[in-house]
Amino acid sequence: MYSVTHTKKRRAINVFLNTSSALPAQTIDRVTVPPPNWARLRDVNVFGVDKIAPFAQSVDNANTTVYVGHSSVPTESVGRYVGQMLDFDDGQVNWMGMFMVTSEGDFNSGKPEVNGILALFTCNSKDSLSNDFQLGSSGALIVSTGGSDGLTNLGVLEHAAFAFVAALTDGNNLENAVAAAQRVIDQSATGIPGVSRPDPMQSEDRIEVIRKEK
């Protein structure tokens, strides 16, 4: 974890980064791309993915949990990408539940139940990855469709997640936060200065909200 802000338990926003943001910048096509400045946001805790326990605790207790970066698949995908798993250094979330590696072996605590907000800013987190979680009556999953190829630029995903979290800290309105993230995705089709080159395919990507069917 590289930045911590102490907040009230239920109001906290916890962000888990499986990206290059632990570095000052990443180089893409010989262009230096600075990550968002997460330290600017108040009441936001930022973690890496070295431990799965803080993620599990956040999904259980925090008002908002945000996972940003790479998802994975059990085998190399053919055609449209469909993210299926979230990887941590000592565990994984997949379609069978949440696995934690312990000294006594792998422990499966079952599918995590979401009663707050869980935002999955990964490539195509909608089609399969969203099913790795159980939605409670008050829960909301925020997912990315990935467009026709299922893929979204990693830098764009992180900046979209940053816009989402910034909007939540500003007004705590989920609809406005989703709209802020979508604006970043839309801008990426023509290129975001200092973040990404133009990619018309990204115009097909959508940030959506999934709630439990009544």
Image: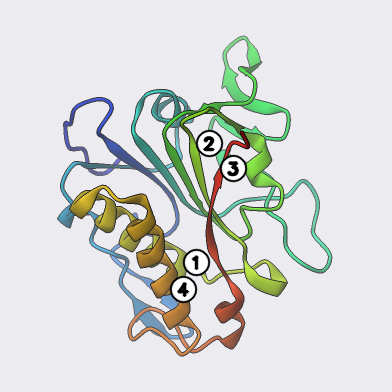
Q: Earlier in the sequence, mark 1 or mark 2?
A: 2
Q: Position of residue 51 (x, y in %)?
A: 45, 31
Which of label 1 and label 2 is nearer to you?
A: 1
The reply to whether discs 1 and 3 touch (Cβ–Cβ < 8 Å) is no
Q: Which mark is residue 131?
A: none
Which of label 4 and label 2 is nearer to you?
A: 4
When the figure is inspected, residue 178 is found, relative to residue 28, above or below; the finding is above
Q: Position of residue 7 (x, y in %)?
A: 18, 31
Three-letter amino acid code of the residue under disc 4: Ile
Q: Which mark is residue 89?
A: 2
Say which element carries label 1.
Answer: helix
The reply to whether discs 4 and 1 touch (Cβ–Cβ < 8 Å) is no
Q: Earlier in the sequence, mark 1 or mark 3?
A: 3
Q: Residues within 10 Å of mark 3 (few under 14, many from 20)?
A: many
Three-letter amino acid code of the residue under disc 1: Leu
Q: Which residue is mark 1?
A: 154
Q: Residue furthest front?
A: 214
Q: Which residue is mark 3?
A: 86
Q: CA distance from mark 3 to mark 4?
A: 22 Å
Q: CA distance from mark 1 to mark 3?
A: 15 Å
Q: Which residue is mark 4?
A: 185
Q: Residue at x 46, y 31 (%)?
A: 138
Which of label 3 and label 2 is nearer to you?
A: 3
Q: Earlier in the sequence, mark 4 or mark 1?
A: 1
Three-letter amino acid code of the residue under disc 2: Asp
Which of label 3 and label 4 is nearer to you?
A: 4
